[in-house]
């Protein structure tokens, strides 16, 4: 029995099925495209992306989006951008390879930082790329080098570290001098003992007694008398030399005592340094006041840069990412870029038209251009560039992921626009810069960071929340800043991703520092006086006994010198007197 | 309801006019639909084959119905297999790269680990499923098939609307 392989009568239902598919495409393609764009955009950005309408024209090779809203990943009630309309001219052939190549995109009515009525955050479901980047960026911003001591200025309290006497130079120098005094005492005592002037003097006196009964013809005795005289003189010379040594030693000890005064002055300075007043340091005022805002700016720039590096990676190696959400396990989808083939996504040229400065003068329209945005920069071969040129706005960006080491640079300067208010951390104060200039630059070369944020506002105003207290520091700050009508702020970021360095300075630094110093100056003076008394107490415990010890030592040495000299002089005199008597004043050979 | 429809599928497949080979071929093709993620380009081809080839559509339905839970259960294994093929076998990277840059092929999502793993598994299992099912249908018909055909349950199922639809696609013997 022959069985037919094909079921020809199924052709009609099959064609009907295909017609149904085409019909479903016509009916639902736009809706599916919108859902895919919203889902993909949300996953990529890490915040809600919504599209009011999406239309794909296969015949015209174009896609039109209206009402695009991308929420900020950092502020739930703020949008990153809104776009009235985006029209993209698609290259259709790459669609067969599941690739999107946009020759030209016109984006009209872009607005940045607009308010939302509902939260734009999305719950993190699994280890997505954007969630991972957000976690990394938050961890980066939480590094100690970027942490601002908010409460130190808010409390305004001064603290004094305990004074450790072992760290006082006076005490150390006194202990050293005491050791030297002991050493001198031992040396001098040994010298006196070895000199033994009294024994020599006693011998000479005894010899003079012998000479009393001697005859002038006893030449041997006369020669011995000469020798005795020489011995007495030599002993006196050695005594004189010892006297010089004692004098020099005494002088050195006195100098040591004098140097204790200088050590004590240094100890006063050291004790002063124990008074902790970090916010009083002028250079730290801006860091405390504007550091968190600066970190937030650079943190956002880093997030978007890292996002770009994730979705626009260098090289042509296979790239894995999460598969599509479905009832079945999503798995992992692996992209396989190939040299000389189109990348998975390429936006060749985008003309941007956007609004800035939503103030009393109304928003103003600007234009810019974005070129070479691609998922595979190595295939495209050129970096992505962004350029905005207008009389009051300049913005440039270059994201070079063509080579192994990525280089991302972006910078923008806006002049004469209404700047958003900046809240001071931990304080019920905020500054509204008003109309002014702001610039933000950020560069990431490999893992080397460079960033600069400046705000120049000649007509800044300050507001204080009436409900909150804020403490002494808030009062002081309010008194200072309410008299300052301009803001000149610069924050600079450097170092590497793992070791960032942030420096912030502003025109408020010195003013606030001076005011704070005068406010708590009395407290500082009292603390300094207490510490001086403490230093004196520790120092005097060592210095007073040392002074007595040195005085006693030099007095004893001088007394022994005096006694020795007197004994020797008397003995010499007696011997010479007997010699003159025997010789009748004639000098014998 | 689901169980009832499954019973319908089983009964109709086993008692269809198709030969055991036609039923088995239908079940093997249907198992591809069930083992792999449904909304995929290759399943459009499989569905077209089920309609166009002279195989048992109830058999395909039965194969699909039985393979769906199996597909969900084996997803971790498919994921691991696909990952090994796509990422763990450098020798295959040139093949995947070539396929990923051909027209239409990337639309099949073959570069997804679960899809590739399940499709490869389904294709490998196609022949064993076919031969096993053909043997099973033959044994069924030789043993208890006639008694079931005369049962009240079979008559009730045969009278249902689904049976009418089935008759449109019954295999031509």
Image: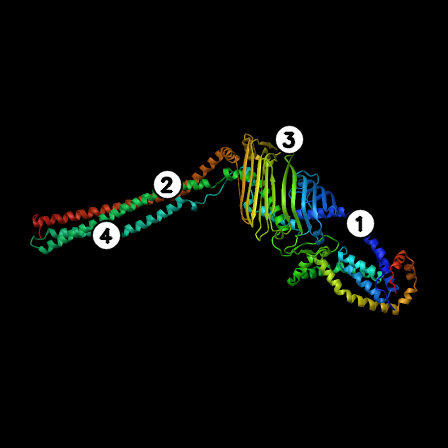
Residue sitting farthest toward the top: A483
Q: Secondary structure at mark 2?
A: helix
Q: Nearer the viewer, mark 1 or mark 4?
A: 1
- Within-10-Å neighbours for mark 2: few <14, some 14–19, many 20+: some
Q: Secondary structure at mark 4?
A: helix
Q: Could you tell me how far apart the alpha carbons at marks 2 and 1 are, in whole angstroms?
A: 97 Å
Is B164 left, or right, of A510 in this rendering? right
Mark found first going from the N terminus, 2 or 1: 1
Q: Is residue A124 visible?
A: no
**Residue beneath the point at 63% across and 40% down:** A368
Q: Nearer the viewer, mark 3 or mark 2?
A: 3
Q: Read off the chain for label 2.
A: A
Mark found first going from the N terminus, 3 or 4: 4
Mark found first going from the N terminus, 1 or 3: 1
Is A524 left, or right, of A233 in this rendering? right
Q: Read off the chain for label 3.
A: A
**Residue beneath the point at 81% across and 58% down:** B48
Which residue carries the number 1 mark?
A24
Residue A18 drawn at (x, y percent):
81, 53
Q: Is residue A102 visible?
A: yes
Q: Read off the chain for label 4.
A: A
Is A404 left, or right, of A110 in this rendering? left
- Within-10-Å neighbours for mark 4: few <14, some 14–19, many 20+: some
Q: Could you tell me how far apart the alpha carbons at marks 1 and 4 are, in whole angstroms?
A: 125 Å
Numbered tag placed on residue A261 in the rendering: 2
In this view, the residue in front, B50 or A134, is B50
Which residue carries the number 4 mark?
A195
């Amino acid at each position: 029995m022959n069985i037919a392989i094909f079921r020809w009568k199924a052709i009609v239902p099959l064609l009907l099925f295909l017609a149904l598919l085409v019909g479903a495409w016509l009916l639902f393609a736009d809706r599916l495209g919108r859902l895919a764009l919203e889902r993909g955009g949300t996953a990529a950005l890490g915040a809600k992306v919504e599209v009011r309408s999406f239309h794909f024209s296969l015949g015209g090779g174009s896609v039109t989006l209206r009402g695009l809203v991308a929420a900020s990943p950092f502020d739930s009630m703020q949008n990153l951008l809104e776009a009235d309309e985006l029209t993209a001219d698609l290259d259709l052939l790459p669609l067969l390879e599941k690739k999107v190549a946009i020759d030209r995109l016109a984006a009209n009515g872009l607005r940045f930082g607009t308010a939302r009525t509902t939260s734009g955050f999305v719950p993190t479901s699994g280890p997505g790329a954007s969630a991972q980047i957000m976690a990394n960026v938050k961890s980066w911003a939480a590094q100690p080098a970027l942490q601002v001591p908010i409460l130190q200025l808010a409390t305004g309290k001064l603290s004094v570290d305990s004074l450790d006497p072992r760290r006082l130079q006076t005490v150390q120098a006194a202990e050293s001098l005491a050791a030297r005094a002991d050493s001198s005492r031992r040396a001098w005592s040994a010298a006196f003992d070895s000199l033994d002037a009294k024994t020599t003097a006693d011998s000479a006196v005894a010899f003079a007694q012998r000479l009393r009964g001697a005859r002038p013809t006893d030449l041997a005795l006369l020669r011995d008398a000469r020798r005795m005289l020489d011995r007495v003189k030599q002993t006196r010379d050695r005594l004189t030399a010892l006297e010089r040594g004692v004098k020099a030693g005494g002088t050195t000890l006195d100098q040591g005592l004098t140097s204790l005064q200088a050590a004590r002055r240094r100890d006063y300075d050291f004790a002063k340094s124990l008074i902790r007043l970090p916010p009083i340091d002028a250079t730290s005022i801006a860091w405390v006041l504007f550091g968190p805002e600066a970190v937030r700016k650079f943190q956002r720039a880093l997030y978007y840069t890292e996002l770009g590096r994730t979705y626009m990676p260098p090289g042509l190696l296979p790239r894995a990412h999460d598969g599509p959400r479905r009832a079945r396990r999503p798995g992992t989808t692996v992209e396989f870029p190939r040299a000389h083939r189109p990348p998975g996504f390429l936006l060749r040229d985008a003309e941007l038209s956007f609004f800035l400065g939503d103030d009393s003068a109304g928003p103003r329209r600007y234009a810019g251009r974005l070129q070479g945005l691609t998922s595979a920069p190595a295939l495209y071969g050129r970096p992505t560039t962004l350029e905005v040129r207008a009389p009051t706005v300049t913005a440039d960006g270059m994201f070079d992921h063509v080579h192994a080491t990525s280089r991302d640079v972006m910078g923008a300067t806006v002049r004469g626009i209404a700047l958003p208010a900046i809240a001071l951390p931990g304080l019920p104060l905020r500054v509204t810069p008003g109309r002014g200039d702001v610039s933000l630059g950020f560069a990431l070369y490999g893992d080397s960071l460079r960033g600069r944020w400046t705000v120049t506002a000649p007509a800044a105003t300050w507001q204080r929340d009436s409900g909150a207290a804020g403490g002494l520091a808030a009062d002081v700050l309010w008194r200072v800043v309410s008299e300052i009508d301009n803001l000149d702020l610069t924050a600079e970021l450097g170092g590497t991703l793992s070791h960032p360095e942030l420096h912030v300075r502003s025109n408020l630094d010195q003013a606030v520092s001076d005011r704070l110093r005068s406010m708590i100056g009395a407290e500082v003076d009292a603390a300094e006086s207490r510490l001086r008394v403490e230093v004196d107490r520790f120092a005097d415990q060592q210095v007073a006994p040392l002074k007595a010890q040195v005085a006693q030592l030099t007095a004893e040495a001088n007394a022994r010198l005096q006694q020795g000299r007197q004994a020797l002089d008397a003995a010499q005199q007696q011997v010479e007197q007997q010699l003159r008597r025997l010789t009748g004043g004639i000098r014998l050979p | 309801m689901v169980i009832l429809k499954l019973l319908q599928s089983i009964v109709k497949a086993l008692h269809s006019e198709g030969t055991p080979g036609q039923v088995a071929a239908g079940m093997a093709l249907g198992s591809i639909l069930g083992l792999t993620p449904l909304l995929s380009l290759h399943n459009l081809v499989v569905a077209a084959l089920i309609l166009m080839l002279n195989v048992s559509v109830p058999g395909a339905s039965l194969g699909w119905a039985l393979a769906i839970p199996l597909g969900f259960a084996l997803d971790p294994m498919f994921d691991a297999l696909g990952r090994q093929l796509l990422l763990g076998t450098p020798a295959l990277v040139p093949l995947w790269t070539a396929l990923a840059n051909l027209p239409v092929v990337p639309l099949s999502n073959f570069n997804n680990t679960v899809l590739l793993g399940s499709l490869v598994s389904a294709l490998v299992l196609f022949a064993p499923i076919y031969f096993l099912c053909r043997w099973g249908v033959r044994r069924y018909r030789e043993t208890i098939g006639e008694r079931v055909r005369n049962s009240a349950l079979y008559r009730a199922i045969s009278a249902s609307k689904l049976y009418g639809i089935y008759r449109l696609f019954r295999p031509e013997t």
